[in-house]
Image (tube, rainbow, N blue to C red):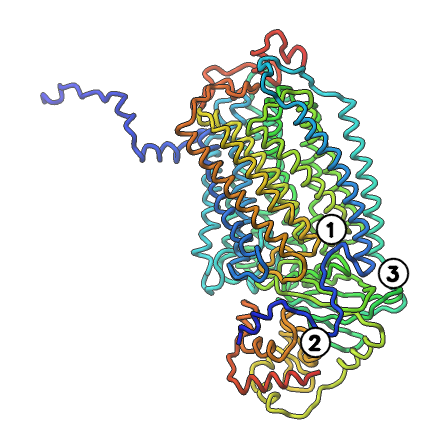
Amino acid sequence: MATIEQPLPVRPATIREEFSWSEVLYKWVATVDHKRLGLMYVVSALVFLVIAGIMASIIRLQLAVPNNHVVGPDTYNRLFTMHGTTMVFFVGMPMVAGFSNYLVPLMIGARDMAFPRLNAFGFWIFLFGGILLYFSYIGGSGLTGAGSAPDVGWFAYAPLTEKPFSQGASTDYWILGIFTAGIGSIASAVNVIATAISMRCPGMTLSRMPVFVWVMVIDSWLILLAVPPLTAAQIMLAYDRYLGANFFNTQAGGSAVLWQHFFWIFGHPEVYILIFPAFAILSEVIPVFSRKPLFGRPAMVAAVIAIGFISLGVWAHHMFAVGLTAWSNTFFAASTMMVGIPTGIKIFNWTATMFGGKLRLDTPMLYCCGFLLQFLVAGLTGIMLAVSPFDWQLHDSYFVIAHFHFTLIGGLVFGLMAGMYYWFPKVSGRMYNERLGKLSFWSFVIGFNTTFLPQHFLGFLGMPRRIYTYPTGRGWEGLNMLSSIGVIFQIAAVAMFAWNVVYSAIKGKRAGDDPWDGWTLEWATSSPPPEYNFEKIPVVRSGRPLWDLKHPQDPDWKFGQ
Amino acid sequence: MANIGLLAFFQVQVPGVPEHRVTDIFKPLASPAAAERDIGWFAIAITALIFFVVASIIVYTIARFRRRPGDDLHQEPAQVYGSTQIELAWTVIPILIVFVLIGVTARVVWSVENASPPPSTLHVRVVGHQWWWEVVYPDYRITTANEIHVPFSPDGKEATYLELTSVDVVHSFWVPQLSGKVDLIPNRLNYMWIDPKQSGAYVGNCAEYCGNQHANMLLRVVADDRPTFQAWAQGQQKAVASDVSAGRTAFESLSCINCHVIKGTRAIGRFGPDLTHLASRSTIAAGMMTNTPEHLKAWINDPQAIKPGCLMPSLKLGGTELDQIVSYLGTLK
């Protein structure tokens, strides 16, 4: 009895500060916080980036000289399939979700996303999809013992994916991995749209919403429209493989072309889905580093909406060689060239934002400048490919490889790099090493251009894509060697970036809340932001609330937009 | 022995035949490829001009407006929000450029895709297989593989119409000097035409990923003058000598006959290339190696060592049997 009278010792609050791995694990696994989920998206995307990058390096090693024997045809075919699939679905897509998750609530003055638990579900199901895809290396052999990882190419043309030509379970892992990750993309897209519509802080009308958020909302709409056709096609393919349906099974009268239509009506909007985050990032970074508002803000938003709409009607430019009628070939050439108009508007407006400004050429801005020039090349080679008779020659050649790597690395990855350096002080509370950042930028520029510029000319010289080896005597040797040498600089750049991020996150200088003298709401809270983001929900009167605060005599709501 | 094959990889230079070993799309030797080259240069000229102008403006902007040491960090530049006139200008000019490009594109699409055949037209049916090309001349009742013989057309009066299809997966026909690519799709007939301006062998590749040995699905189009072509066609129509040799007996007693045709013998398999006039072809293994007895021997002995993953099994024949078969196949002119 007496023991009950004794007061229990009160656990002091400090005891919980003892470091424990299980605590950390629990905090991250069970979190529904948009910032943690956003970070987990970005970090897993970076891990997949390194894996797919290693695959690309092996590909370049194999192609460095003619008749090389680093890997055999079956390994090589798996490498390019897994490289492409990983880069698109497990690097590009989680980057979209990661950036929008972390930044959309902060930029619109909200405490979290609209559906925090749906958000967590989206992340974990995406990660599960990625693991499922890579599990194919172990489980892909199936009952017949044929195959391991998928080897059908990232767009998996039927009927190569049908049972007679793809035995074992490797193609099934490809179907299921992407199908599963697609559910995550849809979940995240719904969430971004709902958040931006219903959770903006008082005063933030749509016309005052940061352009970053605008672009991410349009991106999410595009995900909602583009992913379902792919999902449908994958279910049809799974039916073909297991239930004897014959949608794409040509040996039973199915259609190979049908798959191509399904895939590309997803696949072309998909590349805009991937590039939009870079547009979003540039529209924030360039103004702050030029010290001027974004030039032609309504035109910039309209241009993204126009790109989104037009991108839904261009898919058959991937199919100029399948024998479409002259009318179709002309229609899709025309619609594809039309994308160039709003894309041009974007490049002109970014340049006009810089014109007359005071450019601060720190690492994020350097990456933006790299983006502008390289994406210009990508856009113009895109116009060349849109000229359908020229595409009959260039289609499925190394010219196409060069074109879309200029889009997705020279464009997207450079944009993401700008974003990661720009928001690193906000996320970690510490500053990255500027000298190392610049060094890694220049190494990346040199490496990227050495690898991919020569590939345009390989395409002109008739080198088809997806060949594991090539003959001597066609003038391909020197350019291929050059292309492979560039990889060394790219590896160095990524290594420097990784070191910079890890070291600076632990040992970097304290950055303060607003190191760039920024204008959007995320710079108004502490670095890193607290779980609730803002102590008091802010009230805004213009598109640049922090400019208004810092320049009370010259506020945007009085003189600007 | 496989080493012979490996050493010989891609040293495919057939003596006596002028070879256009280039696959440069800017060196066309047929009308479709020439039309594509011309519109290609046009597109390159326009895009290069745009690149030069826009890139200069971007580089100038970066250089001119970069922050210099000693600049006042607290002095913000003039805040300019936009300009409708400028916005209109850089919307309208690209629209005009796009209109021009679409017009030119449409014209070339029609000229290549909907061209009417010249008076003398040869019809050839090309069927894609994993990883070789079956070539059928319906008017001549000829079936061959991987090498397409056509009459050349220095004056544009001859043309060859190709009917393209596939028995398995999607392939793509690409001989860059002759024409852009058209896919070979199962359950579908596609068409293209070529009119090589010079005689000789033109090289190309399969251009749509079609599985394991996509890289080694090479293609040759051999263009000759009409009489030479007719002579070749008559040679292909001839029946092969019917005398029975040790090699033929060996061939007919092995599983070779399940996949290959040699007309007039028991070999009636249709899965692999027709071998009736194998010795008249200049290459084997879909253009990988020249057709010499050593290469043939290495190939039959162990195809998997030369073209790993191909659908011909390694038969591991003994020395004499192999020699007999090789010398028999050598008689199939």
Circle 2 chain: B
Of tags 1 and 2, the one toward the viewer is 2
| Badge number at residue A391 | 1
Query: Please, what secondary structure does the residue beneath circle 1 have?
Result: helix
Of tags 3 and 1, the one toward the viewer is 1
| Badge number at residue B281 | 2
Label 3–label 1 contact, CB within 8 A: no
Q: Are marks 1 and 2 on the same chain?
A: no
Q: Which quadrant of the rendered structure holds the N terminus of chain A? A: top left
Measured in 3D between alpha carbons, the distance from the residue under mark 3 to the one under mark 1, in whole angstroms, is 22 Å
**Relative height, residue A467 to residue A224 (above, below):** below
Q: Quadrant of residue A200?
A: top right
Q: Are marks 3 and 2 on the same chain?
A: yes
Inspect this view and state whether residue B212 appears.
yes
User: Where's residue A534, x and y in %?
Assistant: 47, 18
Inspect this view and state whether residue A114 appears.
no
The amino acid marked with disc number 2 is: Arg
User: Where's residue A196, x and y in %?
Assistant: 57, 26
Is the residue marked by circle 1 packed among few (<14), some (14-19), or many (20+) residues within 10 Å?
many
User: Where's residue B124, x and y in %?
Assistant: 77, 69
Circle 3 chain: B
| Left or right of A80, for residue A132 | left
Residue under label 3, please give it: B116
